[in-house]
Image (cartoon, rainbow, N blue to C red):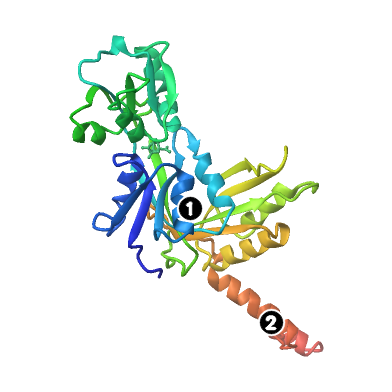
Amino acid sequence: MPASPATFTFLGPEGTFTEAALMQVPGAAAATRIPASNVNAALDMVRDGSVDAAMVPIENSVEGGVTATLDAIASGPELRIIREVLVPISFVLVARPGVALTGIRRISTHGHAWAQCRLWVDANIPGAEYVPGSSTAAAAMGLLQEDAHYEAAICAPIVAQEQPGLAVLAENIGDNPGAVTRFILVGRPGALPERTGADKTTVVVPLPEDRPGALMEILDQFATRGVNLSRIESRPTGQYLGHYFFSIDADGHVQDARMADALAGLHRISPATRFLGSYGRADTQSIHVAPHTSDEAFRAAHEWVGGILHGVPLVQETASEASPTA
Ligand SMILES: O=C(O)C(=O)C[C@]1(C(=O)O)C=C[C@@H](O)C=C1
């Protein structure tokens, strides 16, 4: 079991959904928490040892993968995902007190938040212009600056509750009331979180080039070992047009024989495959394992092959084979 992180960073400032995710981590409320201005800065603080772990968003149920995170953990010095956290998302529209909906022309927020409120904005503030923000809370706090160049921000309800200089103009403005964002706690490589039976493994697999069926071969490594995938996304490596890697979440822990075998297969196909971690699923849902892909089935199969290699007779002769005349 890895030692519990003592110092954390997160996509800040205070009041982001990412901070809400971090507060779900046991011990985080009493620990040192340093806000970072973007995902890369947060991960760099882990890499250079300034903090033990970083909480960053990775996937939203409406908008999909957080590409800044997918890309940042796929290259550079290796990192490990040690936990995942789910946060239900609900947005409010805030402005300086006295500002009405009719007085809003520009709205700032995080890109993922904007994408989740687009229909509401179109219906209620038609023609409003989007001003990109580094996070929802940063956009809201920006309204308090003298030189704010937008009139409203979309953020979590907690920001307005704790900031008297901001008034809530509308609540629950997300287009999808069931929206959920998944966050990951990222540390440096070390001891793996213990296997729980409800685990997830994340890998980054560069697609081998000029090889017909390479993606199928990658997927086959999981399929033939009974490993279910819960997320697969392709991302450009940035090196040149058409060069991609796959970011994959698979059900199970690397201590499961079927997962270890699948990862070994991936390494054969794509030697630059990067292991990003095995960690407990936030929903704690146990994984169904077919009997022929259980640890016991793998152990028996390896023992059988070992016996062949060592010349040990492993199959009992039947009576008729032992004495053909009988
Ligand atoms: O800006 C924030 O508050 C964040 O924590 C980032 C983020 C994201 O990256 O998706 C998190 C949850 C919401 O989906 C909107 C924004």
Q: Is residue 85 above or below residue 297?
A: above
Inspect the image, locate mark 1, and give the three-letter code of the amino acid beneath it. Asp
Q: Residue furthest left?
A: 164
Q: Is residue 144 left or right of residue 269?
A: left
Residue at left 78%, top 90%? 323
Residue at left 72%, top 86%? 317
The residue labelled by disc 2 is: 306
Q: Is mark 1 within 8 Å of ligand 1?
A: no
The residue labelled by disc 1 is: 44
Which of the 4 image quadrants contains residue 132? top left
Q: Position of residue 131 (x, y in %)?
A: 43, 23
Q: Is mark 2 within 8 Å of ligand 1?
A: no
Secondary structure at badge 2 equals helix
Q: Position of residue 113 (x, y in %)?
A: 40, 30
Mark 1 or mark 2: whose residue is earlier in sequence: 1
Disc 1 to disc 2, how far (Cα)? 45 Å
Inspect the image, locate mark 2, and give the three-letter code of the amino acid beneath it. Gly
Q: Position of residue 194 (x, y in %)?
A: 42, 68
Q: Is residue 96 left or right of residue 263?
A: left
Secondary structure at badge 1 equals helix
